[in-house]
Structure formats: C-alpha cells, structure tokens
Amino acid sequence: MMARHIRYPAAAIVAALVVVSITAAGGMQTIQAAGADQKAFRIANFPIEAQAANAVAAKKEAIADGQSAALRSLLKRIVPVSAYGRLRQMGDVEAAQFVEGISVRREQNSATEYFASLDFRFSADGVRDLLRQRGVPFIDRQAPQATLVPVVVATGGTIQPKAGSWGKIWNSLDVANSLAPLNVAGLRPSIHQDVLTGLAEGDDARGMRILTAEYGASRVMIASAEVDSTAKRLKVSVIGRDAIGPINWSRAYRIYDGDSAYAMELAAVVTLGVLEGRWKAAQARQSGGLAALTQPESGVRLEVVFSGARDWYRMENELSSVSGVRDFRVNAVSARSADVSMTYPGGGPGLADVLARQGYQMTDSGGYWVVRQRY
C-alpha cells in the first residue's frame, strides 16, 4: 500500500479543523459589496504533498487532495462557527469545480513524491451559490486590516527583542486573504516591557496610545508566545484592538515531544481563527442573525434621501458596506436623492430590518424603497 500525506504544516491545519467532508455621482457605478478583489476567496501559500507510484501520479494526487483541503479552509474562513454543523449535511462536493486558478509558489519532487506550496483562487459566485443552496450562512466581507506584532516572552516574563520562529510562523500564514486581514510587524525598540505589562494588566488607554503612535494604526495587537518547558505548555495571549474593538484573549497549548514549533503553528492558526470569528459574529449580528443570512437573495431598488454631498458619500459607503449586500449600483444622483439598486438576502424587508439597527428608516413605496437617516 502506497504511503500518503501524513501531516500538513500550519496553513493546512486550518482545513483539518473544519468538520465537513468535501472532496476533490454621474454615470452608473457598481460596487462589489463582498470586496472588489474578492480576497476572501483566495487561499495562498497552501502546502500539499503526496506519495505515489511515480512523480506524475504523486503530483496529481497532491493537487486533488490540496484542492479539497483548501476549499475546507475557505469554508471555515467564511462560515460562522455556530453554523459548522450545517456543513456536515452538504455531503461530498467536487472541489475542482470551484477552482478558478492555481499558481505555484514552490515545488519539488522525487521519483515517487511531490511537495509544493500553492495559491488557490476559488469562484466567489460558485462558492456563494453552493452555500445558499444548502442553507449555510456565510460572511465574505473582510474586516479592516489590523496590525499584529508577534512577541516572544522568555522565562521570567522578559520580552525578547526578536520574535524568531513565532514571527516567521505568522508571516507564513495567509493573513492578507483572511477575513480578519493582518499586517504582521516586528516589535519596535521603543515598545518597552512596561507598555506590554500595562496592557496585560488592563492599562488599555496608555498602552494603545503608545502602540497607535508607534505603528501609525488604530488597530494594533500584541500576540505573545511564552514556552513553559517544565510544564510542557505554550501560552499565547492577544492584547490590543482589532476591527471589533478591545481584545484580551489567551489560551494554553500542550507541547508534545518537545516540539514547541508545531505548538506555535497550531496556536497561530487558532488565534487567526479567533480574530476571524469575532468579525463574523459581529457581522452576523449586524445582518440580523444567521437566519437572515440564509434567506434567498432578491433585488432591492432604493431612493436614498440625503441633505447634501457629504451626507450622500457617507450614506453610500454605509449602505454598500452592509454585510450581505451585493451588486450595489448607483443608477442616478440628484441634489437631494440617489437611485440605487442591489441584491440582498430577504430583499427589501430583510434590508429594512438591518438598516433599522443602524439608524436608517426604510419605507416601502411600491416597487422601490425610500431610505433616509433617522435624526
């Protein structure tokens, strides 16, 4: 019997965690609400490997298995954790039919083995349609980017100037295409121990002022890793602010056979999943819950009423940014109103419920809806 893939590195741990079986103002303008670049539907730097009777067969097998694993990673990325159970009911799906492109970053092979790191680009519409057909809610809009600073804490609580393998692991993850995209940055020499200690102890205001000034961003997080060799544990903490708000989260991982690097890989993947989960939960609440996200899409025609140009630009941005809005189109703009169309799960009534939570009033005028800000 031929040996097959045994262990994927960090990027593929994501796939393994998924409990689902899937196999191989003028003229018109349109805004793709889920993100014009559709980064959320890309899985980058994904490792694959296989062993077979020859190199050609090994490559074919590795790519087929890799497509399935990458799709599982994608589904885990965009489906809320509370809806993972619905993925079990999807049955077997041929992953290849949703792949739009594959590019090779690195590859090597022997007479019977094939190893590579690939970038997979999946069809955004195809994956969305699949999930809608199966009644699975999803969030495919990326959060605003945050800066994450990996930090290693030595025995005794001393902050190390270099993050070493912990930093390299974070740089190897697909953080750009994540639903909670990150800019991974090094620890600045000006960030002293007392700043991190203060953050950990609840001095958020002072610590965040310093981090914001040093990194030039309002969303900055410290991700610290501390290895306790005696207890064979790795403690990971994330402190700072992401797209949702303040975060102070920690978790411990067991280190098996002294392999702290593997524990760090798993910890980084889980931490990224936590950041994505925070964003998905907030977006689901904003959209009226999971039930609202699974309703059939239908077209909505709006007359947006505003007081002036600045008011319109703000309202246009807010309306097009509502989670679940697709094909946002500005058909015409006048001095005090705009003709807008889009698609949304649940149509006009569904959108009205969501916008009501954001301070808008939608009135059904027969054939179209009038939207204005409540003051």
Image: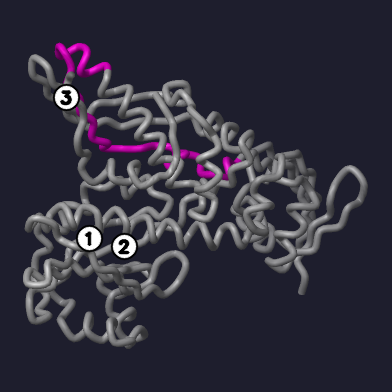
1 or 2: tag closer to the N-terminus: 2
* Residue holding disc 2: 147
Q: Secondary structure at mark 1?
A: loop
Can you give x and y, in whole percent of width and height, for residue 269 in the image? Answer: 29, 53
Marks 2 and 3 sit apart, C-alpha to C-alpha, by 41 Å
Can you give x and y, in whole percent of width and height, for residue 97 in the image? Answer: 47, 21
Q: Is residue 34 magenta?
A: yes
Seen as rendered, the residue at the extreme front is: 1
Marks 1 and 2 sit apart, C-alpha to C-alpha, by 7 Å
Tag 2 near tag 3, CB within 8 Å: no
Mark 3 crowdedness (10 Å alpha carbons): few <14, some 14-19, many ≥20: few
Q: Secondary structure at mark 3?
A: loop
Mark 2 crowdedness (10 Å alpha carbons): few <14, some 14-19, many ≥20: many
> Camera-side residue: 41 or 260?
260
Mark closer to the observer (2, 3): 3
The answer to whether residue 335 is visible is no
Q: Residue at x 8, y 14 (%)?
A: 111
2 or 3: tag closer to the N-terminus: 3
**Is 366 placed left or right of 243 in the picture?**
right
* Residue holding disc 1: 185
Q: Quadrant of residue 152?
A: bottom left
Q: Secondary structure at mark 2?
A: strand
Q: Quadrant of residue 271?
A: bottom left
Residue range highlighted in magenta = 31-60
Residue 219: numbered disc: none
What amino acid type is highlighted by mark number 1?
Ala
Tag 1 near tag 2, CB within 8 Å: yes
Q: Residue at x 29, y 69 (%)?
A: 251
Mark closer to the observer (3, 1): 3
* Residue holding disc 3: 3
Image quarter of the C terminus: bottom right
**Is 52 placed left or right of 126 in the picture?**
left
